[in-house]
Image (tube, grey):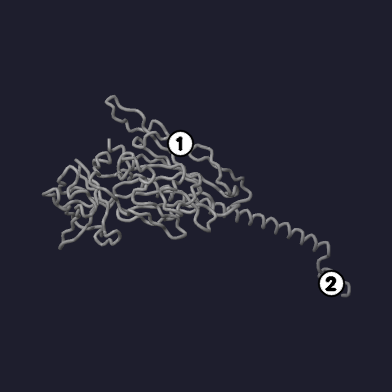
Amino acid sequence: MTHDRSCRWRRQQGLTLVEMLVAMTLGLVVLVGLSSVYVAVKQSFRFQETSGRMVEDGNFALDSIARDLRMAGFAGCMGITSVTVGSTTTYYPTTSLSSAAPNPGGIDGPNPLSVLEPSNAEVTPQPLMPKGFLRGFDSIPSAMFSTGTAPAAGSSSALFFASGSANVVSLSSAMAASTDALTITEDTYKWRNTTTNSGVYDFVVSDCTTSNLFRGKVSLSGSVASVAHDNALGNQTGSFTGSPLYGAGSMVMPLEWRFFYITTRSGADTPSLYMVSYDGNNRQSAQEIVSNVEALRIHYGENTANNPDGSATMQPDVWRTTAAAVTDWSRVVAVRVGLIMVSGEDNADNDISLTVPTLLGQTYTLPTGASANRVRKEFSTTVVLRNRVAAR
């Protein structure tokens, strides 16, 4: 009995020191392995999340520009080459406006091109003329902004374009006399409720014969809405140039423009895509469209060839890689837009070799002070200026 108890006692002893050391070593090996897997999975998830966010933001930024750019030059079925502007002397607002921080703004007037080219009759004060409805810049033109409000120019491109608005109403009855107000079906967009700039808008009226740009004000008498265009509103006369009598079904729309550029918001680590716009009545404050947009580059498809009869072919036979290289803005028929999206944080994945992409097929140089450790992706699209093509 004593021998049996001794055997059982020996069998119930704990682990030896050597056995404990071996077990701890094996446990540490497994733990290190699991930790490595966890870190790798976490880094992969972080990288995928960053990439997914960049894709979503990049597509949204491109769509924001392309959607509005497709309207560039719209002025009714006759196109921008048939817009008459002789009856209009000024546009609202006539003074520089500034924006409060953190929004960079202060862009001048409803036709900022007139500030840059005061002697060019094609753009002063005619933002829907062939040379004025679209204009690109290789950096932000500070002259378009009031004193002290221009954002840093940087090396990114900027893009300005004008058009008639997609907010269109139709005339419900024809004009009987050239001085008659335009009777519209209804004030769908509540223009008559606008108080800014006394409720006066820059309007385009168009049928398939002619178009006019004028200053007008919407009023309501009973259930009938009408658009006045007398000289008290700033027009030279109470009649449209050429004294056309616009018929029922003719279109009335505000004049609009958009200006896209890249700048860095106060306190931000990376730049953003900004837009300043004009809705026909008021210059809107700068809007931050998408953050983490490091660069905007634009190429311009210019038509340089003519048909045998001397008319333009309206196909981009030369792509200009800078705005300075464009020889005739009235012959730009397509625009290629490229963006560099950048991650919002440094070192999105330390184990991945980060490379700087090209932008629209050209070498891309990081902005001064930009971190080389951020993930970057290129996004691009090509927009045919359909209203330019349709105008021919």
Position of the C terminus by quadrant:
top left
- Which type of secondary structure does the marked residue at label 2 adopt? helix
Q: What separation in Å lies between label 2 and label 1 (alpha carbons)?
A: 89 Å
Q: Disc 2 marks which amino acid?
A: Trp
- Residue in the foreground of this view, choosing between 150 and 381: 150
Q: Of 350 and 242, which appears nearest the observer?
A: 242
Classed neighbour count for the residue bearing mark 2: other residues with Cα under 10 Å, few (<14), some (14–19), many (≥20): few
Spot occupied by residue 180 in the image (x, y as percentages of width and height):
14, 52
Q: For residue 321, which numbered disc appears in the image?
A: 1
Q: With 301 as the anchor, is 354 left or right in this view?
A: right
The reply to whether residue 201 is in sight is yes
Q: Which residue is mark 2?
A: 9
Residue 313 to residue 194: above or below: above
30 displayed left or right of 324: right
> Which numbered disc covers residue 14?
none
Q: Secondary structure at mark 1?
A: loop
Q: Residue at x 81, y 69 (%)?
A: 14
Quadrant location, the N terminus = bottom right
- Which numbered disc, 2 or 1, marks the residue closer to the eye? 1
Residue at 88 percent of width and 72 percent of height: 3
For the residue pair 346 and 154, the one nearer the viewer reads as 154
Name of the residue lying farthest toward the left:
176
Which amino acid, mark 1?
Answer: Thr
Residue 95, quarter of the rendered image: bottom left
Q: Nearer the viewer, residue 196 or 7?
A: 196
Q: Where in the figure is residue 87, as x and y percent of width and height?
A: 22, 46
Q: Earlier in the sequence, mark 2 or mark 1?
A: 2
Spot occupied by residue 28 in the image (x, y as percentages of width and height):
73, 59
Classify residue 336 by image quadrant: top left
